Amino acid sequence: MTINRLFLAIPVTLYSYEQIKKEFNELLQGEWREEDHLHVTIAFLGQRFQPDMMIEKLSQFDWSFELSKLTKFDYFSKSRVFVATTHNPGLQRLYGRLEMLLGLEYADLNPHATLMRVKKIVDAEAFSNLLKTAPIEPIGILKSKVILYSSVLQNDGAIYEPLQEWLI
C-alpha cells in the first residue's frame, strides 16, 4: 500500500556528513538519511492538495527568506530523530505567508534537517554530552531554493520525489 503526501522543503548542504556519522556512529543505532535527501521542511501539506494545483498556485509566490547555517545538533525524543538545527525566524515568516495563501493551520516551526531515525541510543550519557557541545564550525547551510516534494510512504520507508523547484 502506498500513500502519496506533499510537503515543501528547503534542501541543505552539510559540510562533512561523513565526519558527523563517524562522530555519532558509536553512540547511536539507526538509519542515516541519504545526504542528497536532507532538507528542512517548511510546510507539510499531506494529501489535501493536488500537485498540479500546488505548482500553479505557488508559481508566483514570494519565496524570499534569509539563508542560514545549521549550527547545532539535537535529539527529538518523541519522534526519535537525530537532527541538525538552524535558528532562522525568516522561515516562520515564510510559513506565515504560505499559511495565508493555502489556508494552513498555524504551526510553530522548529527548523531542522533529520540526519537519522534512531532505533537505539547506545551510550546515553556520551550522546547527551556530545549534544551539549556546540560544533566547532557550522554543520551545513540551507540552499537558496524551495522544493515541492511528493513523499510516497511504502512498507520500507518514504521515497521523496521532487515535483517543482523555486529559486529564491
Image (cartoon, rainbow, N blue to C red):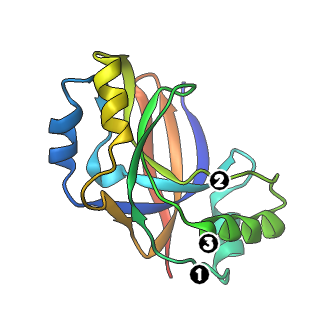
* Horizontal side, residue 62 vs residue 79: left or right: right
Label 3: element kind: helix
x%, y% of residue 134?
A: 33, 50
x%, y% of residue 110?
A: 59, 50
Query: Mark 1 or 2 closer to N-term?
Result: 1
Label 2: element kind: loop
Query: Mark 3 or 1 closer to N-term?
Result: 1
- The kind of residue on which mark 2 rests is Leu
Residue with the mark numbered 1: 64
x%, y% of residue 13?
A: 31, 62
Q: CA distance from mark 2 to mark 3?
A: 10 Å
The dot on residue 109 is 2
* Horizontal side, residue 95 vs residue 24: left or right: right
* Horizontal side, residue 25 vs residue 85: left or right: left
Query: Which residue lies at the image location 70% right of the left edge and 44% below the top edge?
Result: 47
Query: Which residue lies at the image location 73% right of the left edge and 54% below the top edge?
Result: 49
Query: Mark 2 or 3 closer to N-term?
Result: 3
Front tag of 1 and 2: 2
Quadrant of res 39: bottom left
Query: Which residue lies at the image location 43% right of the left edge and 76% below the top edge?
Result: 144
Q: CA distance from mark 1 to mark 2?
A: 17 Å
Is residue 29 shown to the viewer in this render? no
Question: 41 or 153: which is nearer to us?
Answer: 41
Residue with the mark numbered 3: 90
